[in-house]
Image (tube, rainbow, N blue to C red):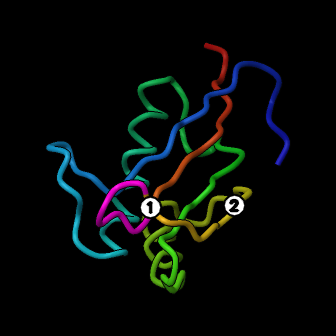
Amino acid sequence: MIAPAGRLLYVGGQNGTDSTGALRDGLGAQTEQALRNVLAVLAEAGSSPEYVVKLTIYLATGIDPGEAYAATAGVWGDRRTAVTVLAITPARAGALVEIEAVAAVPAG
């Protein structure tokens, strides 16, 4: 991915927590919510998914990524984005996924 010249936004790790801070149940629900949280940060900063040049997805060790990939496609669609997926031990108990992003912020 080649980012357009200009400002970059680094979105820190987003878990599958809703607006009350409650962790959603299951990998699919957590993945969808984490991506919605990324989308909210992008919008707040004046960016959008088409400007995302990199996603990093951290999955809890031992998780089959298939369900996470399906949930990602449901929210993210078929956008072409560089993606790295890593298995980690989550810092938050019960968290199965964490997603961070790097995006360009268009001039405007």
Q: Quadrant of the C terminus?
A: top right
Q: Which residue is mark 1?
A: 90
Label 1 crowd bin: few (<14), some (14–19), many (20+), radius 10 Å? some
Which residue occupies the extreme left position in the image?
A: 20
Q: Which mark is residue 83?
A: 2
**Observer-nearest of 87 and 106:** 87
Residue 55, placed above or below residue 47:
below
Q: Is residue 52 above or below residue 41?
A: below
Q: Which residues are magenta?
A: 91-97
Q: Residues within 10 Å of mark 2 (few under 14, many from 20)?
A: few
Q: What residue lies at 45% left-to-right and 82% top-to-bottom?
A: 67
Label whose residue precedes the other's in the sequence (2 or 1): 2
Residue 5 lies in what quarter of the image? Answer: top right
Q: Is residue 75 left or right of residue 25?
A: right
Magenta segment, prevailing SS (helix, strand or loop): loop
Q: Is residue 94 magenta?
A: yes
Q: Residue at x 68, y 31 (%)?
A: 104
Q: Tell me the residue at 44%/70% (across/down).
A: 74
The count of marks equals: 2
Residue 2 percent coordinates (x, y): 85, 42
Q: Which mark is residue 40?
A: none
The part of the image, by quadrant, that contains residue 91 is: bottom left
Amino acid type at image mark 1: Pro
The amino acid type of the residue labelled 2 equals Val
**Residue 83 position in % (x across, y down):** 69, 60
